[in-house]
Image (cartoon, coloured by chain):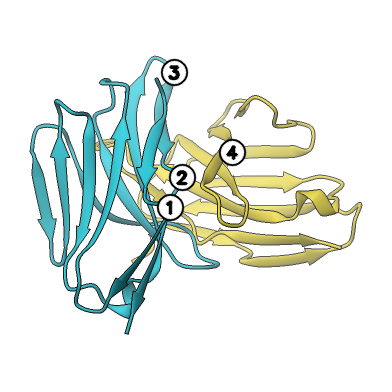
Chain colours: A cyan, B yellow
Amino acid sequence: QQQVKQSPQSLIVQKGGISIINCAYENTAFDYFPWYQQFPGKGPALLIAIRPDVSEKKEGRFTISFNKSAKQFSLHIMDSQPGDSATYFCAASMVDTGGFKTIFGAGTRLFVKA
Amino acid sequence: GAVVSQHPSRVICKSGTSVKIECRSLDFQATTMFWYRQFPKQSLMLMATSNEGSKATYEQGVEKDKFLINHASLTLSTLTVTSAHPEDSSFYICSVVTIAKNIQYFGAGTRLSVL
């Protein structure tokens, strides 16, 4: 019930194309859904995040689509660029009696071909 | 700018020595910090939750005597890998969470290589 399933494991996209990464969660107590971008040898950087009271959030070329009933959310990268090549992690967070908790997806390695 | 500062970024040490990694919250006081470990091509694995002024909470399977955590102030947590061995070689990342909005930020990570 605490898993976050992320797909695909890897993704190759042409420059200018749309990259789409999907995640699904199980526990409806999660109330914050961030996406992190990680370059090799660096820590994850918060890219964009959404809370379940909205179905979509857009920041520049990055959009999160959120489907509360299906317990799924996805990251869309429009006009993908070679500089977007990185590993992307989705996550689901909540605060319960034990404190703050985050469950991470397994990650998606994105490669954007020039 | 950076929210979390982590040092060193890379450390190489001999087997049997101890290594200390520092994590500083730059923008706000953090009563709780988190320490993660990441193996190549894998996701982040939570090791422990660092609580200011009290003992850290370790995840199952993480040796608390091997990975000593000290959270002496509201802006600083340290992870000490004691008597490091080659199998401890990994990428260690700290994290802080904002109190108001529960947004999680990560440090730049520390690459530990034990020879």
SS at circle 3: loop
Query: At label 2, which amino acid type do we have?
Result: Ala
Q: Position of residue B36 (x, y in %)?
A: 56, 44
Front position among marks 3 and 2 = 2
Q: Is residue B41 above or below residue A28?
A: below
Q: Position of residue A51 (x, y in %)?
A: 17, 37
Tell me if mark 2 has few (under 14), some (14-19) or many (20+) residues whose alpha carbon lies within 10 angstroms of its own: many
Tell me if mark 4 has few (under 14), some (14-19) or many (20+) residues whose alpha carbon lies within 10 angstroms of its own: many
Left or right relative to A81: residue B87: right
- Give the letter of the chain under mark 1: A
Query: At label 4, which amino acid type do we have?
Result: His
Cβ atoms at labels 1 and 3 below 8 Å apart: no
Q: Residue under label 2, please give it.
A: A106
Residue B71: numbered disc: 4
Left or right relative to A101: residue B114: right
Q: Residue at x 59, y 39 (%)?
A: B72
Front position among marks 4 and 1 = 1
Q: Position of residue A36 (x, y in %)?
A: 35, 54
Measure the alpha-carbon separation of dots 2 and 1: 8 Å
Quadrant of residue A71 in the image?
top left
Q: Residue under label 1, please give it.
A: A9
Tell me if mark 3 has few (under 14), some (14-19) or many (20+) residues whose alpha carbon lies within 10 angstroms of its own: few
Disc 2 with disc 4 on a shared chain:
no
SS at circle 4: strand
- Give the letter of the chain under mark 2: A
Query: At label 3, which amino acid type do we have?
Result: Gly
Q: Nearer the viewer, residue A73 or A38?
A: A73
- Give the letter of the chain under mark 3: A
Q: Specify which label sits upstream in the sequence, 2 or 1.
A: 1
Measure the alpha-carbon separation of dots 3 and 2: 23 Å
Q: Residue under label 3, please give it.
A: A98
